[in-house]
Amino acid sequence: MWRAGAGGRRLARGARAACRLYSQTATRDTIFALSSGQGKCGVAVIRTSGPASGVAVLRLTGTKELPQPRSAALRRICDPKSSEMLDRGLVLWFPGPGSFTGEDVAEFHVHGGPAVVSGILTALGSLPQVRLAVPGEFAKRAFQNGKLDLTEAEGLGDLIHAETEGQRRQALRQMGGELGQLYRRWSDALTKALAHVEAYIDFSEDDNIEEGVLSQVDTTVEILEEELRVHLQDGRRGERLRDGVQVVIAGPTNAGKSSLLNHLCRKPAAIVSPVAGTTRDVVEAALNIGGFPVVLSDTAGLRDTNDAIEKEGVSRARERVGNADLILAVLDAAEMAQQPSRLAFSLQGILPPTRSDGAQPCLLVLNKSDLLGVQNQEGLLQACARLGLPPACLLSCKTGEGLPNFLSTFKEQLGHMCGNPLLGSPSPTQVRHRVSLTKCLEALGRFGRHRDLDLALAAEELRQARRLLGQLTGQVGAEEILTLIFKDFCIGK
């Protein structure tokens, strides 16, 4: 009779503990909430989820039969205590598990007046074992019931909050499960590798394990390490697209930084004045540039000053520049045209000291081009190219000349930084993804170091790596490892 080794017993205990934890935290009460937006609207959707959803429909509609599943039925909706009519609307019934949450779900599509919505929510709250949902509880139940993994739930949340085309596309792809499928494929590979190592530890002395088992594990780990490295070397495209590209407008005083901000915002977001040092604090605006989300910051002019307030503004500007994803370095074109050789020196005064070589993405904006002739403009651009400076754009914030070309270059730069969310392998979209994947890669590296010294320690590193991948999708169970031992090996033949 086969007996599990120490590793197998630990896995079995872990699986049972996970099941006990789920049974302790799973809730069986029925929740309800307004699923559509707040305020006056034509139609409001009120949703319930849980075992009492059917009872709620019968009590509020005063009928003895539920509507046909997934079919809209016009019903009078009344207060269950007073029988007062609250509204006439559509009622939809989604019996579990064929619903969003996997539980019995009901929806009331009613008129969107605040009094109507309030009346129906109050009526639902008066029913026994029915309570108002907390934020995100419907999606949480969908996850708990296996309708969504964690990455899909995050994609749903991102879709709800998406403000640009790029964000919408990325969220839809993640909600469709591509990111979760990638992580599950890696997790399955680690599960199989761990099963092989556990079996080798427990049964190798009996000569019941096929030859080359550990070599297969080594190959699997090497392939996975390489795929993880490539996945993490994406330039944070997914995170930037989700949270917004941090773009900082920086440069000396009176170069036209605030004017550029106002042009991009299409409103007077910052004060523009010929007096140097007008901008003291960081002025921030969230924009949609070509379908890409941008958090644009206008900063104080960079110069030496004895004014305590302006000095603090310059310090904050330096800090923003150091943390920026993209720097819009604004210089006075008229001033630079007099001494083109100073372009590199002036740019160096804007970029962080550690990145003055242009390693940090930067777009050089030469403002006040209306003060230059055509010949001087061409000479200035040629000087930028000759000096190997970042992409340069001539424009006039005063007349708007050159603004279309600047926007085109700006969008191109954003597209390069964020990528096309519909092409290639999906990218990590949250910091937690990157942290878990980095730790997983480190655990795989430790496996290689322990491999020939202590196989038990090496197995523990595989177990840790697999646990970290499981955290990404919410699947951290261990019972399937025991199943794979029986499936992949003919033990005791």
Image (cartoon, rainbow, N blue to C red):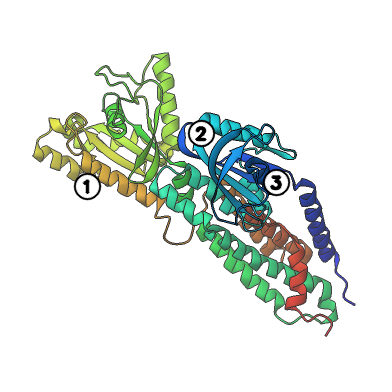
Q: Which residue is mark 2?
A: 38
Asked if 404 appears above or below 7 in the picture, the reply is above
- Residue 241 image point, x, y percent: 44, 47
Choose the circle earlier in sequence order: 1 or 3: 3
Q: Residue furthest bottom?
A: 493
Q: Secondary structure at mark 3?
A: helix
Question: Which residue is at a point 65% across and 43% down the rendered structure image?
Answer: 62
Q: What quarter of the picture does the N terminus occupy?
A: bottom right
Looking at the rendering, which quadrant does residue 219 occupy? bottom right
Choose the circle earlier in sequence order: 2 or 3: 2
CA neighbours of label 3 inside 10 A, class few (<14), some (14 to 19), many (20+): some
Question: Which residue is at a point 46% across and 52% down the rendered structure image?
Answer: 170
Query: Could you tell me how many numbered marks the image carries?
Result: 3
- Residue 179 image point, x, y percent: 54, 58
Asked if labels 3 and 2 touch by Cβ distance under 8 angstroms, the answer is: no
Q: Which residue is mark 3?
A: 55
**384 to the left or right of 4:** left
Asked if labels 2 and 1 touch by Cβ distance under 8 angstroms, the answer is: no
| Amino acid type, callout 3 | Val
| Amino acid type, callout 2 | Gln
Mark 2 or 3: in front is 3
Asked if labels 3 and 1 touch by Cβ distance under 8 angstroms, the answer is: no
Q: Which residue is mark 1?
A: 386
**284 to the left or right of 99:** left
- Residue 248 image point, x, y percent: 38, 35
